[in-house]
Amino acid sequence: MSQAHVGGFEGLVAPDPGSIPLSRGDRDMNPPGIGFLALLREDLRIHGGTIFEQGFWAVAVHRFGNWRMGRPKLLRAPLTILYRMMFLFVECAAGVSLPYNVKLGRRVRIWHHGGIILHARSIGDDTQIRQNTTMGIARVDRHLEIPTIGARVDIGCGACILGGVTVGDDCKIGANAVVLGDVPAGSTAVGVPARVVRRSGSGEEPGS
Ligand SMILES: CC(C)(COP(=O)(O)OP(=O)(O)OC[C@H]1O[C@@H](n2cnc3c(N)ncnc32)[C@H](O)[C@@H]1OP(=O)(O)O)[C@@H](O)C(=O)NCCC(=O)NCCS
């Protein structure tokens, strides 16, 4: 890991150039230990128990996109057409883009809708995502560098998490933050570029 600080701010460290290939999406990456229908029921419950939550649509289509990869090839072809149509529908109607090859944890909730682009390597269990959140590359010539989001991360509206950064477990990302470096587990990062303002448990300010 490079020790260069991003924007000179404490706690955010520039990631190494991404060299790990992205998931090819050639297998079912739904969380293990739970069946497809039980997973959908859990997602529905997390989204307030209503099918009229656009976040639920996005997550359900994502689960379906993965589930189909575990079917025999002959059956998969029509399911793939269906998946692509549903993906496009969610993108256009709800403004949520969540490709199936993002490794998505359990009980991830997408609040509201619109302007939500979730091109990450993985998003951990119990993470909360809000409207106008963007996860993706920082530069067009570094297409392998996309974020990794831990478990129980609470992401404020309008946050941009860019490049091959890692946001650790139990972090909070402030509304409209632009995250360009790794955020240590348990931290709160705010601002443009984002800086760590709090680390949970210690009650201490970073650097003190
Ligand atoms: C970051 C957040 C979680 C607050 O965390 P917190 O641990 O309670 O932190 P505090 O409110 O004590 O703020 C700590 C510092 O960060 C600043 N800060 C908090 N949120 C900020 C933000 N989004 N952007 C810039 N600075 C912010 C505060 O002004 C404070 O600065 P100071 O120490 O110089 O006074 C919260 O402010 C936030 O942004 N939540 C997003 C919620 C959301 O998206 N709601 C939309 C619902 S539809």
Image (tube, helix red, strand yellow):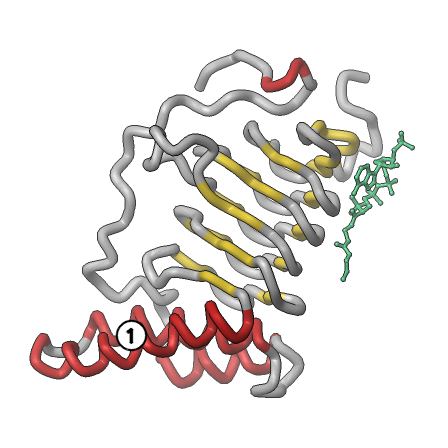
For numbered disc 1, what is the local secondary structure?
Answer: helix
What residue lies at 61% left-to-right and 79% top-to-bottom?
53
Query: Along the line of sight, which residue is nearer the eye, 207 or 136?
Result: 136
The image quadrant where one finds ligand 1 is: top right
Neighbour class for label 1 at 10 Å: few (<14), some, many (≥20)?
some
Reading the image, the residue beneath label 1 is 67
Residue 100: which quarter of the image?
Answer: bottom left
x and y, in percent, of residue 199 in the image: 74, 33
Q: Amino acid at mark 1?
A: Trp
Asked if residue 113 lies left or right of residue 42, the reply is right
Query: On the rendered image, what quadrant is the N terminus found in?
Result: top left
Say left or right for 134 vs 173: left
Residue occupying image coordinates x 57% and y 30%: 180
Residue in the foreground of this view, choosing between 32 and 138: 138
**Image coordinates for residue 193, horizontal then vertical, percent:** 67, 28
- 175 in relation to 204, above or below: below
* Coordinates of residue 71 in the picture (x, y in percent): 17, 78
Q: Position of residue 136 (x, y in %)?
A: 46, 43
